[in-house]
Image (cartoon, grey):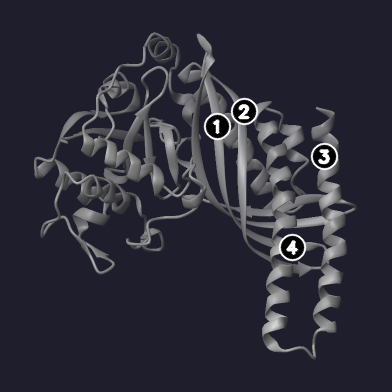
Amino acid sequence: MSKLKIKNKYIKIIIMSLCLILPLSLGLIVSKLNSNKSEMEAIKIEEDDNIKQQYQLLLQNLFDYRNKAILEQNEEILKGLYETEKKTGLWAYEHEVEKMKYLKNWSSKQGVVFNDIKTTVKIRKVKQKESDLYGIICNVATDYNYSYENEKDIKNTFRMGTEHYLNIKIKDNESIITKEWYTDPFADSLNLENIKSDDIRNYILAQQKPEIELTKEQEKAIDYAHRYCGVSIEEEFEFKFNKDYKNFNPDGGDCANFASQIMYESGRFKKNSIWNYHNSSGTKAWVNAQGFKNYILNSGRGSIISKGSYEEIYKESYNLRPGDFVAYEKGGRITHVSTVTGVDSKGYALVTCHNTDRLLVPWDLGWSNKAIRFHLIRVHY
């Protein structure tokens, strides 16, 4: 606990290194003004990489503290990481508190205990805004490790990806978040406390992991999903999508596009005039969540397992198998789809998807409140 309150020595060492590197970098650049252009560019690239590495370590430690605070449900420690005197810092802190409460509520409903939360950071850009203020854009992959209450020795892990825009202030050898924005994977379920969880928890804890036999096409679909989900555990593909397909996130979302890719790349399903992708463009059935769900059902390539609120269909979710998908309905429309690519130690379906990138995440995590209806879809591999 004391380590969290005073922060650890590594952050101070990193900050001191940054204070040395920045003026040294400037001096090197000035001393080379008369050198040729290519040499200057090589030096600048090398220095930029060094600075990014330093900030990557700083953020890694900062996120580690935040993860520990969330695990320990300690709001005071969490508050110490933000400049709450300013509105942007206060808003960022309050959102993390809501997320912390959500994880507690979900874990109670699920009958699980979170053992660890670990973060991997990749800095994309660092910009000095003021003498002590830096703007940072980075990709973040967060691994959540959990165990069920009645099988504590069995570990389950899922991964989520987010893109962060932060302002970090460095003062008196300490770093503090003054502003943070990212698309939160949990944002749609921050009122999970409305769900009555005792019966649900008891049912989930009574389940056992089933034996699942997969076709070759299902195996190909799963391998593709795990490789190109954006948070692959394969270092070569971490924070990367398949470049053969357009990323539709800037156009409103990439979830249906990725679900379509998974089905097509399995080798089981062929494109046609209704469900098609070509030259960086996709049909409505390929790229739109509502259109995708409707096409799969109307074409006979899939069939409905169950639909309704979480409390109405969570038992039916145990019929989901890798290759199937879950469609999430808000306000009468399907707004998201996720592909099932595995099950955990209790047989609870795990999904992989784009938008906020997910790898083997419990299918309702981030969605399980009463305002959302689920459509569980069997895909006919």
What amino acid type should be assigned to the residue bearing mark 2? Asp
> What residue is rendered at 86% in x and 37% in y?
6
- Looking at the image, tell me whether mark 3 or mark 1 is earlier in sequence order: 3
Between 73 and 372, the one lying in front of the other is: 73
Can residue 171 be seen here? The reply is yes
SS for callout 1: strand
Residue carrying label 2: 116
Tell me whether circle 2 and circle 3 mark residues in contact (CB < 8 Å).
no
Q: At which x and y percent is residue 278?
A: 22, 65
Can residue 184 be seen here? The reply is no
Between 319 and 31, the one lying in front of the other is: 31
Residue carrying label 3: 7
What amino acid type should be assigned to the residue bearing mark 1? Tyr
Q: Real-space Cα distance between discs 1 and 2?
A: 6 Å
Residue carrying label 4: 51
Q: Real-space Cα distance between discs 4 and 1?
A: 29 Å
Q: Real-space Cα distance between discs 3 and 1?
A: 22 Å
SS for callout 2: strand
- Looking at the image, tell me whether mark 1 or mark 2 is earlier in sequence order: 2
Mark nearer the viewer, 2 or 4: 4
What amino acid type should be assigned to the residue bearing mark 3? Lys
- Residue 144, labelled with which disc? 1
- Residue 369, labelled with which disc? none
Q: Real-space Cα distance between discs 2 and 4?
A: 29 Å
Tell me whether circle 3 and circle 4 mark residues in contact (CB < 8 Å).
no
